[in-house]
Image: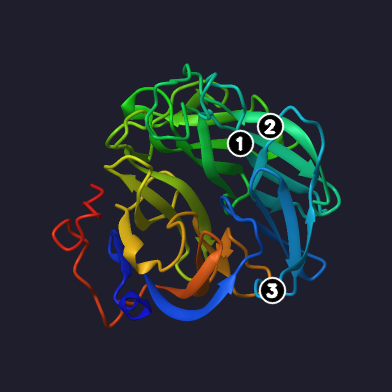
Amino acid sequence: MIARLLPFLLIAGLACYSQYAVLRPAPRAELPEVIDGNTAAMWADGQLHIFHSSGVPARSKGADQFTLAGTESVQFGGSEHKPVWFESVWRDDDGTLFLWYHHEPGGVCPGSNLTAPKIGAAVSRDNGRTVEDLGIVLESGERVDCTAGNGFFAGGHGDFSVIADQDRGYFYFFFTNYSGALEEQGVAVARLAFADRFQPSGAVYKYFHGEWNQPGLGGHMSPIFPASIAWREHDANSFWGPSIHWNTALERYVILMNQTCCRPGWPQVGIFGSFSTDLVNWTAPRLILDKPAIPYGPAFYPQVLGLRPGETDSLASATARLYVHGISLWEIDFSHEAPAIVPEPCTEAANPACPDPQ
């Protein structure tokens, strides 16, 4: 199975420039349990810290991503927004941590396990040992749909990641919208002014029809990667769960996503990637790893972790580790130079489980 990873390649062009991401087999590495979403990472006191969760958040740390240990529960103040998954983190110059979480409220659809996630913000002044809730910042304004057939969500916003732009002007939220009209579903984007990070509730605005003019609490959105079949259907077809980083070798933002397609039970096609210089305009997503090439468990929650000190899930250079659901069997190389092997693009004829996302 590993041998077939060699040809997988992400290719895209912007103007006269191109960028490439190529996978190579690497010794197996695993993040500490439990992984159920994007794993937020940051450096403090010479150690890499990660936040991982399955409703109850935990923190692990070590000299690098291969020596993480000392897993302990994160003390998250209050109970209003539990269960919680911390999926992104930013460490200020003074050591203050800003964390963003996915929250799944209970009792949304009586007699059903369906929920409608929301996205919230939090702050910590002790590297994440204790965390203070700053409230919900992204929430759908649509009614929940308790007839939804995807098996998990009756609407809502969730499964996201956050990145600060290179000028520290804004934090950008890339999130999955499971609610409302089909034309608003898929992977959408919102932003928070850097200056508003201590008081974010009501200060996040969604991108809609070319403007940042819709409130994060309610409001409309224009997805940057729109769904093809709505999430309320049993055979939903959509990208979801974006993970974003700034790549110093490419001087581009790189986003990785899952895609579910076309059958009941939220089946996964594989891992897709796209590039951007401005966080709004993205290259067409290309398959970099299909589900049959992932020889273990769930084929979702992709992310990179940079290999150098200071690199994280939101900052990487020419070579990083690619993790899928907390396990890495690959290194991923980023370059402007075309590699020696350029495979045929993914087609439905080559892999019936992987229709063209476009």
The image quadrant of residue 47 is: bottom right
Q: What residue type is labelled 1?
A: Leu
The image quadrant of residue 134 is: top right
Residue in the picture at 65% in, 71% down: 65
Q: Which of marks 2 and 1 is nearer the N terminus?
A: 1
Q: Is mark 3 on a helix, strand or loop?
A: loop
Q: Distance between the residues labelled 2 and 1?
A: 7 Å
Vertical placement of residue 167 versus 133, above or below: below
Q: Are marks 2 and 1 in contact (CB under 8 Å)?
A: yes
Q: Mark 1 points at which residue?
A: 192
The N terminus, quarter of image: bottom left
User: Considering depth in this image, is 130 or 290 the residue closer to the camera?
Assistant: 290
Q: Is mark 2 on a helix, strand or loop?
A: loop
Residue furthest to the front in view is 111
User: Considering depth in this image, is 77 or 345 the residue closer to the camera?
Assistant: 77
Q: What residue type is labelled 2?
A: Pro
| Residue 336 visible here | yes
* Label 1, residues with CA under 10 Å away: few <14, some 14-19, many ≥20: many
